[in-house]
Image (spheres, grey):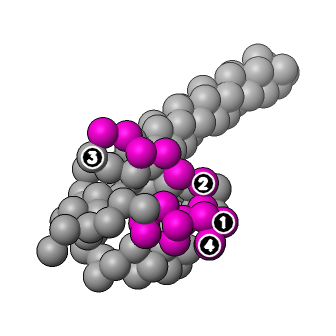
Amino acid sequence: MKKDWRNIEKTFLELGIDYKLKSWVYWCKVNNQEFYYSPQKERWRVKGKKVWQQSESTVDFIEQAKNYIPPNRTKSQQKKTSSTSNSNSRKNKQSNKSNRNKKLQQQPK
């Protein structure tokens, strides 16, 4: 079934969705989150992600986009967090060593 692009754009306008047609997909902004929507295949994805999700219609896509909750952290953010905590634990160990050394030096012999 061939999609009528005017109806898609009309739906976006009626629901107050920011959009731009980019070649064969629409770029849309829903709840401050950016999405790409392909009306031919009725699929959508989050900008910056590679995985496409299925939708039944333009309205269904918008509902799914409104309900989309981004994951808490990406793998790269998890790695950064763990490397930061490792760095902090190293700093604490070094600080503890230097504090022990200072105490030893201050004790009378």
Residues shaded magenta: 7-23
Q: Amino acid at mark 3?
A: Trp
Q: In screen coordinates, is 24 left or right of 27? A: left
Mark 3 sits on what residue? 24
> Disc 3 and disc 2: Cα gap in Å?
17 Å
The kind of secondary structure element at disc 2 is strand
Q: Dot 1 corresponds to which residue?
A: 16
Q: In the rendered structure, are the residues bearing label 3 and label 2 in contact, judged by CB atoms less than 8 Å apart? A: no
The Cα–Cα distance between marks 1 and 3, rounded to whole angstroms, is: 21 Å
- Image quadrant for the C terminus? top right
Q: Position of residue 94 (x, y in %)?
A: 60, 27
- Crowding around mark 2 (Cα neighbors within 10 Å: few <14, some 14 to 19, many 20+) is some
Instruction: Name the side, left or right, on which 57 lies relative to 69.
Output: left
Residue 12, x across and y down, in percent: 54, 65
Q: Which residue is mark 4?
A: 15
Q: Residue at x 74, y 28 (%)?
A: 99
Q: Earlier in the sequence, mark 1 or mark 3?
A: 1
Q: Is residue 18 magenta?
A: yes
Label 2 belongs to which residue? 18
Gap between marks 4 and 2, in whole Å? Answer: 9 Å
Towards the viewer: 76 or 4 = 4
**Mark 1 and 3 residues: CB-CB less than 8 Å, in contact?**
no
